[in-house]
Amino acid sequence: MSFRHKALRRTVAAAVALSSTFAHAAGPAATSPTYPDADASDPARLGWMVGSPPPADRILRFEDGSYFQFPAMRWSVSHFRQLMPTVNVSRGLGPATALPQALRDDIDDLVFQPLGTDKSMTWKESLKANYTDGIMVLHKGRVVYERYFGVLRADGQHGAMSVTKSFVGTLAAMLSAEGQLDPSRRVSDYVPELASSAFGSATVRQVMDMTTGIRFSEDYADPHAEVWAHAAAGNPLPKPKDYSGPRSYYDFLQTVKPQGAHGEAFGYRTANTDALGWILARVSGKSVAELLSERIWSRLGAEQDAYMSVDSTGTPFAGGGLNTGLRDLARFGEMLRNDGVFNGQQIVPKKAVEDIRRGGNPADFAKAGYKLLPGWTYRDMWWVSHNPHGAFAARGVHGQTIWIDPKAEMVVARFASHPVAGNAANDPISLPAYHALGVHLMKQK
């Protein structure tokens, strides 16, 4: 294997993690005891990329994959724009929407019981246990809690990972509610280039809900698994001269083969969101980044521009490339909690929000075997809990979350850099913590 191939392989391995194709929420639940804890892995304490230039052993690079090796990735998730090509998601030129504050001093001491244990934990303890980089809680539209750790600051941005999917799903639900996109039509009707791929015969709805029958293996021990081809195609670095695989996300999607029947089971596969991004681009005439800016970000009163990572042709990574500020992530969640209304306007049609909250087919979801998510479903690229509070969530690898609890009138936005990608590593703590906080806030005036 040539040096170029080895370098590409290392970078692709890192890109696989970044692309959130690790994001099976039912993955291994145990965190390896060899990982340093949140304090020992604190990126500010470790001094990554500090200096002009930084010391040789503190330099991180995209090209060799060092940027996404733990604990270095705890710095990288807050600095992706420094390391790879990106495209802007403009907030527009208007003023930022104020977030009223009513900060509370009783949340850190909130006690709850993590899943699978008889021991209790405080909210404050849970933040370090899950390697939290930043967290904000809104209650009735007011900021009641805001914390930052490591190198993330209030004016900084952080990788949202697969939370990106929920933004893309929201855009699709919007266009559907407005009659611009027909979820019952075949993908090939909108993107003829996908006609001969497994996506061609699927409906847009099946893509939106990830019930497509596509072959997309995420077996990282298999060098021929589709996950590697996907990551290599999206890698923006120059390919080796003898590389013959797909060279962009769009190229890769055209190679996806069928496996099983469409519409029979939920299967979480990032390729679905890339396909949906292509459909949205074709319908709107704009890239996902441009559409997100025009329809949501510039109307939200965001404090900061967002940005998305791109492949070598400049196509935004719809499956996991969004980076935002924490407060703006919370604004987006609050807008959806309020049936699409925010900043004095109806940004997302109420019909679209209702469709998200309705959830998907429980039988389809159950076939995926998510042991920590009993009774949940998936709709419009949102995870719907169907719990007594009607909570629904956007979820990304390493702990990224928007948790919306309509009954408690609460939104939690969290950025994190957990060493284990799959959400099953943090769900036993995070899920009961969010619910306990909602119950707690409902009891307070």
Image (cartoon, grey):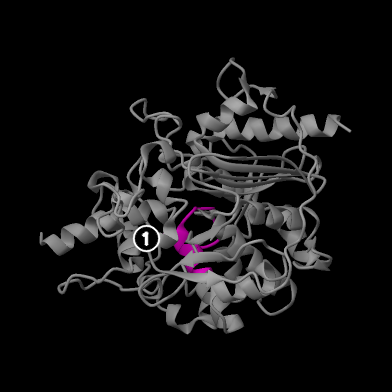
* SS at mark 1 in the image: helix
Assign the N terminus to one quadrant of the image.
Answer: bottom left
Which residue occupies the extreme right position in the image?
Answer: 445
Note whether residue 202 is visible.
Answer: no
Residue 168 rendering spot, x and y as whole percentages: 59, 65
Closer to us: 152 or 235: 152
Image vertical order of residue 266 relative to residue 172, above or below: above
Image vertical order of residue 44 relative to residue 110, above or below: below
Left or right for 52, reference 108:
left
Residue 419 rendering spot, x and y as whole percentages: 41, 38
Magenta-colored stretch includes residue 271: yes
Residue 335 quadrant: bottom right
Give the residue displayed 81% in from the left and 55% down from the top.
Answer: 338
Magenta-colored stretch includes residue 230: no
Closer to us: 394 or 121: 121
Closer to us: 388 or 328: 328
Note whether residue 129 is visible.
Answer: yes
Residue 183 rendering spot, x and y as whole percentages: 64, 71
Q: Amino acid at mark 1?
A: Leu
Residue 445 rendering spot, x and y as whole percentages: 89, 33
- Dominant SS of magenta comes to loop
Name the residue beneath numbered marker 1.
83
Badge 1: few (under 14), some or many (20 or more) residues near its Cα, within 10 Å? some
Question: Magenta residues?
Answer: 259-276
Left or right for 344, reference 233:
right
Which residue occupies the extreme left position in the image?
Answer: 1
Which residue occupies the extreme top position in the image?
Answer: 118
